[in-house]
């Protein structure tokens, strides 16, 4: 499967999943229309063109992974996926991608569409592209929402892709990159700072959404993320090396930049409408890239993935991918009786995690909850981990809360984990405070010692329901 964005857009159009929008302004209108789109029953990928103040052909894409058909296609699983079929396909997918990633070595090429146009100093101008101001309360124009920030491990040379918000600074000459301290990219930068006083950095800003998926989920730190994308797509990706830093960039990307970051090159940043559903303003100046090169194709497409109050651009993707990754990770721990996992979109795919188990021994439910709450794939900004019995659908919050109301005794079944991995974008994090959080582990399972005599659920049997549905289809309709 090719990793070219334009080829994928042709497929999306044929599948009826692409909608072109003409004449929307970069200033709020693209963001507002994107929000309206996400809240449709079946969002589309939106391709904005004829943006006022910019030449036709300078485009912005949003909503690229906002429904199961789009996400399934990006993952190479075809255009006919549903929530259920995606999860069935992905039960083993992420684990296999991690294991098989070394089989998909990156091909380095000397040229590619990305190098069609190369700008260096003093001609750097990021505002030559129609960078949106996505939300009314944003403190500027954000070029990095659907981006993949490229960093290299100083000691191993391994490449990481991370999705971090990036605000245009200095009238288009630079961009800040807001990386949470615990992320792999931040760890890379700190090691480079300690060793050499500066760190190389590159960013692809328009590319096939598969790179956005890899950048937006927690791929293990010992896996090269370009190889991970290759395993995901079933074909190695091709990259070109940046002319300044040597960092690899997808050869067929739409827009990319590279340069250097140093600890003292910082700018005020934000506020920005974040995935928590609240505006987040940086409480300290943020690392800013000294941009040395900007690369772009002719008539480039900027990939947007603006967050906000869920549902937002990538909340569906994160929910599905995190659910699959956490399912795989829990299975790898040897936890028995696992029946389902869902990282709910209401919590941005992070803060509300439901785990369903078939209880097999005393303490089994609590064990599942504690494991899930602190897995590397789940620990960041988790706030509520709820474990339910196997008769409860973890995707259905109505069922989950029904189980909590009847099977959870708050006095004995809710425990609090303190000083866990939080975030600066958490609306509860106080100015100047370290980004800790706490999380509730909620056991909403029937008490193990009462499994045999716990009250029976008052609903018709599956057999009886199937019989009446068959006999009275006009009611079942």
Image: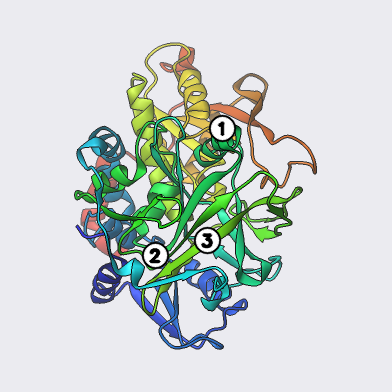
Q: Nearer the viewer, mark 1 or mark 2?
A: 1
Q: Is residue 309 visible?
A: no
Vertical side of 97 occupied by 246: above or below = below
The answer for how far apart the CA atoms under marks 1 and 2 are is 39 Å
Report the front residue among 295 and 23: 295
The crowding category of the residue bearing disc 3, from other C-alpha atoms within 10 Å (few below 14, some 14 to 19, many at least 20), is: many
State the CA–CA distance, disc 2 to disc 3.
Answer: 29 Å
In this image, 446 relative to 459: left or right?
right
Q: Residue furthest right?
A: 431
Counting from the top left corner in percent of width and height, residue 17 is at 32, 72
| Sooner in the amino-acid sequence: mark 2 or mark 3 | 2
Question: Neighbour class for label 2 at 10 Å: few (<14), some, many (≥20)?
Answer: many
Residue at 41 percent of width and 49 percent of height = 247
- From what the image shows, is residue 247 above or below residue 369? below
Q: Is residue 6 left or right of residue 302?
A: left
Question: What secondary structure is found at the residue carrying circle 2?
Answer: loop
The residue positioned 80% from the left and 44% from the top of the image is 431
Label 1 element class: helix
Label number found at residue 221: none
Disc nearer the start of the sequence (1/2): 2
Q: At 34% across and 32% down in the image, what residue appears?
A: 328
Which residue is denoted by mark 1 in the rendering? 195
**Residue 129 picture location, percent across and down:** 51, 76
Residue 64 tag number? 2
For the residues labelled 1 and 3, the Cα–Cα distance comes to 21 Å
Residue 61 in percent (x, y) is at 43, 71
* Residue placed under numbered mark 3 in the picture: 292
């Amino acid at each position: 499967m090719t990793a070219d964005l334009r080829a994928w857009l042709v497929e999306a159009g044929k599948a009826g999943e692409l909608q072109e929008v003409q004449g929307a302004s970069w200033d709020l209108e693209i963001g507002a229309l994107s929000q309206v789109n996400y809240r449709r029953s079946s969002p589309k990928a939106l391709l904005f063109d004829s943006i006022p103040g910019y030449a036709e052909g300078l485009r912005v894409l949003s909503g690229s992974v906002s429904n199961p058909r789009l996400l399934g296609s990006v993952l190479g699983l075809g255009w006919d996926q549903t929530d259920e079929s995606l999860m069935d396909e992905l039960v083993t997918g992420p684990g296999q991608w991690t294991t098989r990633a070394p089989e998909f070595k990156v091909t380095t090429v000397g040229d590619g569409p990305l190098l069609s146009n190369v700008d260096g100093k003093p001609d750097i101008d990021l505002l030559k592209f129609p960078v949106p101001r996505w939300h009314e309360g944003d403190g500027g124009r954000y070029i990095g929402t659907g981006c993949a920030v490229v960093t290299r491990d100083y000691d191993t040379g391994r490449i990481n892709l991370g999705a971090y918000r990036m605000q245009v600074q200095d009238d288009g000459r630079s961009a800040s990159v807001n990386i949470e301290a615990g992320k792999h990219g931040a760890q890379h930068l700190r090691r480079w700072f300690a060793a050499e006083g500066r760190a190389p950095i590159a960013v692809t800003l328009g590319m096939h959404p598969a790179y956005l998926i890899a950048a937006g989920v927690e791929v293990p730190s010992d896996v090269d993320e370009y190889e991970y994308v290759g395993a995901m797509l079933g074909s190695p990706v091709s990259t070109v090396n940046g002319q300044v830093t040597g960092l690899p960039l997808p050869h067929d990307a739409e827009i990319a930049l590279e340069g250097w970051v140093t600890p003292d090159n910082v700018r005020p940043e934000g506020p920005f409408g974040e995935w928590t559903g609240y505006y987040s303003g940086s409480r300290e100046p943020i690392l800013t890239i000294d941009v040395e090169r900007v690369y772009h194709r002719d008539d480039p497409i900027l990939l947007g993935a603006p967050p906000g109050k869920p549902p937002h651009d990538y909340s569906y993707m994160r929910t599905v991918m995190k659910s699959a990754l956490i399912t795989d990770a829990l299975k790898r721990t040897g936890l028995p009786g696992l029946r389902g996992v869902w990282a709910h979109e209401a919590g941005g795919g992070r803060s509300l995690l439901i785990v369903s188990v078939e209880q097999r021994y005393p303490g089994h439910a609590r064990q599942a909850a504690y494991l899930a709450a602190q897995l590397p794939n789940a620990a960041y900004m988790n706030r509520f981990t709820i474990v339910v019995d196997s008769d409860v659908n973890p995707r259905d919050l109505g069922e989950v809360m029904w189980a909590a109301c009847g099977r959870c005794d708050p006095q004995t079944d809710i425990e609090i984990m303190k000083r866990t991995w939080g975030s600066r974008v958490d609306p509860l994090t106080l100015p100047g405070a370290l980004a800790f959080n706490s999380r509730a582990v909620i056991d909403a399972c029937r008490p193990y010692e009462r499994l045999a005599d716990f009250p029976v659920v008052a609903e018709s049997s599956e057999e009886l329901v199937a019989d009446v549905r068959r006999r009275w289809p006009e009611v079942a309709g």
